[in-house]
Image: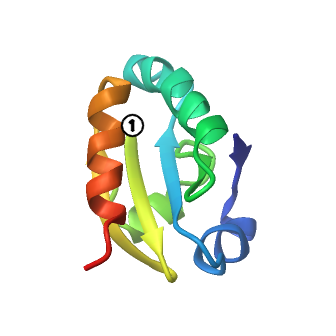
Amino acid sequence: MESVTEETFDTRVLGRGKPVLVEFWATWCGPCRMVAPVLEQIARERADVEIVKLNYDEEPEVGQRYGVMGLPTMLLFRDGEPVRSFVGARPKSRLLAELDDALRPA
């Protein structure tokens, strides 16, 4: 899973042609460590969504821009806009179900 920064966010997230799930995390965050392997698995298994991570402690401006209040927060972007947020660690099956629901055509 690739890391993004404030400098690469517009290109790597907002400018992508497919949906991008951004995990806002921090090294001190226990639930972030719990969800990281789940996101790694999903990133390897799914071609329809790109998953990247952003260290909130190093890049707080991006998180603040999108109203991130707790960690981990995962924001799903489509066509440069946030379309769904997922806050907190969750099992893979639940995250996949929520992701599938969010990716379903309107």
Q: Position of residue 69 (x, y in %)?
A: 28, 50
Q: Position of residue 63 (x, y in %)?
A: 45, 59
Instruction: Please tell me in which quadrant of the rendered image residue 82 appears.
Output: bottom left
Q: Residue at x 38, y 27 (%)?
A: 92
Q: Is residue 92 above or below residue 74?
A: above
Q: Residue at x 64, y 79 (%)?
A: 17
Tag 1: Cα neighbours inside 10 Å, few (<14), some, or many (≥20)?
A: many
Image quadrant occupied by the C terminus: bottom left
Q: In the image, 88: left or right of 53?
A: left
Q: Nearer the viewer, residue 67 or 104?
A: 104
Q: Position of residue 53 (x, y in %)?
A: 60, 45
Residue 95 visible to an observer of this rendering: yes
Q: Position of residue 25 (x, y in %)?
A: 50, 37
Where disc 1 sits, the SS reads: loop
Q: Which of 75 and 68 is in front in this view?
A: 75
User: Which residue position holds label 1?
Assistant: 72
Image quadrant occupied by the N terminus: top right
Type of the residue with mark 1? Pro
Q: Nearer the viewer, residue 55 or 91?
A: 91
Q: Which of 84 and 101 is in front in this view?
A: 101
Instruction: Please tell me in which quadrant of the rendered image residue 101 appears.
Output: bottom left
Q: Which residue is drawn at 61% across and 31% down?
A: 40
